[in-house]
Image: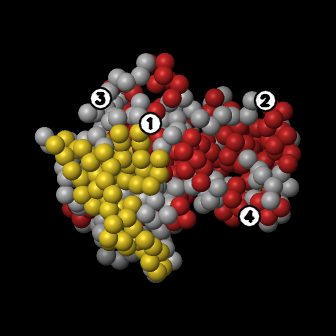
Amino acid sequence: MITANRLTNEQYAENFSEIQQPFETKDAALTEANRCLFCYDAPCTKACPTSIDVPKFIKQIATENLKGSAHTIFVSNIMGAGCSKVCPVEKLCEGSCVYNLMEETPINIARLQRYSTEAAIKNNWQLFERKKATGKKVAIVGAGPAGLSCAHSLAREGVDVTIYEKEAKGGGLMTYGIAAYKVTPKFCEDEVNYILGIGGITIKYQQSLGKDFSIEDLQKNYDAVYLAFGVGLARQLSIAGEDLIGVEDAISFIYHLRTNPYSSTPVGEKVAVIGMGMTAIDAATQAKRLGAKEVTLLYRRTQEEMPCTEHELSIAKLDGCKIIWLASPKEILGNNGKVTHIVCDVMQLGNADASGRRSPKPTGETFTLEVDMIIKAAGQMPFQSLVTNNHLDNKDGKINVTNNTTTNIKGVFAGGDCVNGGKEVVDASQAGKDGAKAILNFLFYAKPQSE
Ligand code: SF4
């Protein structure tokens, strides 16, 4: 049966302390910075969705110009501190570092990025001057990475920004949807406060689109609107037994854990987690760190196709989570309304589909696991009814935009997960920049159109 309060407060504190450690000394950071070859045509920069000038910021660290390096990072990505902790760098900058070609360890770009951005946040170095007020006002829906990035870019240009956020804190996915041992609650709060430090940005908390205000309300009071409300509905498995007590979705599980004391988050003794993306790994490892005895990740494909990185997989393995590849949930069994077992199809991979991924098919064999908790992490869905009710063109709930930014409603722009269906924090940060650019163009340069 699922219970909370399994561990002592000291154990919870230890299990949820940050796992990625900074450089221990300045010398260690300088030594790593000096390994960089400062490539002319830097592949690490090309691999970054926000195009951070990696060799430049590393050179600035090497020459002890820490403020300059933080500026180089933030000018491309104001969420650069958070991204240094949560980016899948193996697939991005570090995975593209030329050292990989020489079969040597790539430059630890993330840790160097953390080195300078954390110094900037700790010392509150405000590295951008806000331009004179333009008198223009923009409303943003959502204080997650896309909303904050858009707000900062607009505030720099002298636009007054009001963000409407449905939660009690800013940061979005960073604050509510990622493992606490990757980004601590204190770090998330500090990062949001640092971004707001530029001035000209107000956040109205606990304000939900569709409940407390409409897009029409915002259009009446602001010169433009940017929608960055993300995704958040868990994809259902659509199998028997899904409504039994003990079956939960990963988003709710992580949200509860991030908004309550660890001791009050219920967790089972034997937990199965469905999925192999970052959210699945975060749910599995945190279930283990909350005191679950056995955690098993179930994935219908193989390690080759898994969406998480090898680094994330290694965290799960080090935490003692088991992984069963080629397993797809078929049915959930229970007793007295509570989950007791999960039955899975044993899968095999068929031919590659249009996206190049091989499709899994049942072999006809099944196996059964005894569990008292199941966490579903099989993907997230857009807020379809919210989007449709607000007359936004969309495809299955994902807002349709032109030029990456512009919705079908005049003066209303959108970006981040509510457009792309859910990508990385760094993608949302770039989307916010793109949105701000389009809004500035709309406010100051667009020719009036005849209605
Ligand atoms: Fe430095 Fe590696 Fe980027 Fe080259 S690819 S600039 S060595 S971090």
- Quadrant containing the N terminus is top left
Find disc 2 in the rendering and name its residue: 25
Decide: few, some or many residues near mark 3? Use Cα within 10 Å; few <14, some 14-19, many ≥20.
Answer: some
Per the model, the C-alpha gap separating discs 3 and 1 is: 13 Å
Crowd band around label 2 with a 10 angstrom C-alpha radius: few (<14), some (14–19), many (20+): few
Helix, strand or loop under label 1: helix
Q: Which residue is mark 4?
A: 43
Label 2 SS: loop
Horizontal arrangement in the rendering, residue 370 relative to residue 338 (left or right) = right
Q: Horizontally, is 242 left or right of 447 in the view?
A: left
Indicate the position of residue 395 as horizontal and vertical percent values.
32, 71
Of 203 and 5, the residue lying toward us: 5
Please tell me which of labels 3 and 4 falls first in the chain: 3
| Residue bearing the label numbered 3 | 3
The residue sitting at 42% across, 47% down in the picture is: 296
Question: How many badges with numbers are in the image?
Answer: 4
| Mark 4: amino acid | Pro
Q: Amino acid at mark 2?
A: Thr
Q: Which residue is mark 1?
A: 288
- Three-letter code, disc 3: Thr
Which circle, 3 or 4, is nearer the viewer? Answer: 3
Q: Which marked residue is nearer to the observer: mark 3 or mark 2?
A: 3
